[in-house]
């Protein structure tokens, strides 16, 4: 089978993590890089050239890249607010898409791009890499085996002190800034994951309680939430860009609890503890940097002719987008494009 040729949009920091995997993985390679800054895109392409693989090209525009029949799929790593335009252009061109989380900035945008992907029959997946980590596969086995009984309570934090630049990606409302979309998406996604008996099969949300604090720019700098699900399970989280947190994930059940070590979104270790029993430790290191699972899944799905990933279905993305929209509404966070 021919090597899967990736196009990359947005050659920023996170894109280097993607390129590291693609340029090491058998059966795929980085074909084309496209960004608003041509010099930056050229430097990125040059940095990731590797012996024995085609030299990455640089496209002058997204339209130029999408017109290339050699491109098998596109990875989007631009700021959140720019995702929707890039996704729509790719889908209209018939190019499969793996897009960084959050898939888009608003619930309406999520509904629009999902409907377009389904209407065009083109693969679309939100790049929530944590769901594909080897560690979480092991934790899933613990949960499925009933090692802690029914899950009753999930707690998580994702907090760090971000660059205070009000024009930067984290705090700029025009770029869909704020702690929730940048960090809290992990808290929400992994809380749902812990309560799922199958992907996309979390109990319905019964009640939502939210509090937080806003930055001077009007976006959320700190969010604390409690989600109560039908059946009684509870998930509590805090995400913030104004200070450090424990940044672990705890899953508590009837007969014990599981703790996913810091940083839970990229974790390689978890522990299982039950009363009166020795603590069990699970170590599952990344093969490369952790992105390999989601990238492998996207390639597998595209080659199989699937429109979405069974492990990260579009219904999951729509629920997360709806939750985040409601949380932003309650906090009074408004983007210029809402």
Image (cartoon, grey):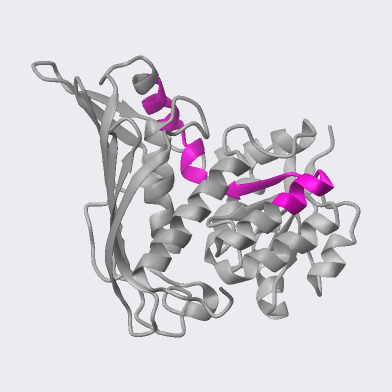
x then y, percent, for residue 175: 53, 76
Q: Quadrant of residue 231?
A: top left
Q: Magenta residues? A: 115-141
Which residue is nearer to you in this view: 255 or 33? 255
x then y, percent, for residue 285: 41, 35
Which residue is nearer to you in this view: 303 or 43? 303
Magenta residues, dominant SS class = helix
Q: Quadrant of residue 151?
A: top left
Which residue is nearer to you in this view: 127 or 187? 187
The residue under the point 56% across, 73% down is 338
Tell me if residue 276 comes above or below residue 40 in the rendering.
above
Q: In this rendering, would 136 be left or right of 69? A: left
Q: In this rendering, would 41 be left or right of 78? A: right
Asked whether residue 279 appears in the rendered view, the answer is yes
Q: Quadrant of the N terminus?
A: top right
Asked whether residue 51 appears in the rendered view, the answer is no
Tell me if residue 315 comes above or below residue 90 in the rendering.
above
Tell me if residue 267 comes above or below residue 276 in the rendering.
below
Which residue is nearer to you in this view: 136 or 15? 136
The residue under the point 29% across, 70% down is 161
x then y, percent, for residue 130: 46, 43
Q: Residue furthest left?
A: 276
């Amino acid at each position: 089978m021919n090597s899967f040729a990736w196009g990359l949009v947005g050659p920023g920091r996170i894109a280097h993590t993607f390129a590291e995997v693609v340029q090491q993985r058998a059966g795929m390679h980085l074909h084309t890089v496209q960004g608003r800054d041509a010099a930056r895109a050229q430097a990125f392409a040059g940095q990731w050239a590797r012996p024995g693989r085609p030299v990455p090209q640089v496209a002058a525009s997204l339209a130029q890249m999408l017109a290339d029949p050699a491109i098998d799929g596109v990875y989007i790593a631009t700021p959140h607010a720019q995702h929707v335009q890039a996704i729509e252009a790719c889908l209209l061109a018939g190019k499969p898409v793996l897009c960084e989380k959050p898939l888009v900035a608003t619930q309406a945008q999520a509904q629009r791009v999902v409907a377009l992907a389904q209407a065009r029959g083109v693969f679309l997946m939100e790049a929530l890499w944590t769901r594909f980590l080897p560690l979480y596969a092991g934790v899933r086995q613990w949960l499925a085996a009933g090692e802690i009984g029914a899950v009753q309570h999930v707690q998580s934090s994702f907090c760090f002190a971000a660059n205070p630049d009000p024009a930067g990606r984290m705090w700029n409302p025009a770029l869909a800034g704020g702690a929730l979309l940048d960090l809290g998406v992990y808290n929400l996604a992994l809380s749902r994951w812990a309560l799922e008996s199958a992907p996309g099969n979390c109990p319905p949300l019964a009640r939502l309680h939210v509090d937080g604090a806003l930055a001077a720019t009007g976006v959320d700098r700190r969010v604390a939430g409690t989600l109560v699900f039908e059946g009684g399970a509870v998930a509590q989280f805090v995400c913030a860009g104004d200070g450090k947190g424990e940044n672990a994930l705890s899953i508590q059940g009837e007969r014990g609890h599981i703790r996913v070590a810091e940083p839970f979104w990229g974790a390689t270790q978890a522990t299982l503890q039950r009363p009166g029993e020795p603590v069990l430790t699970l170590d599952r290191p990344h093969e490369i940097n952790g992105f390999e699972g989601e990238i492998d899944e996207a390639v597998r799905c595209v080659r199989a002719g699937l429109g979405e990933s069974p492990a990260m279905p579009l219904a999951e993305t729509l629920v997360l987008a709806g939750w985040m929209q409601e949380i932003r509404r309650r906090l009074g966070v408004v983007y210029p494009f809402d």
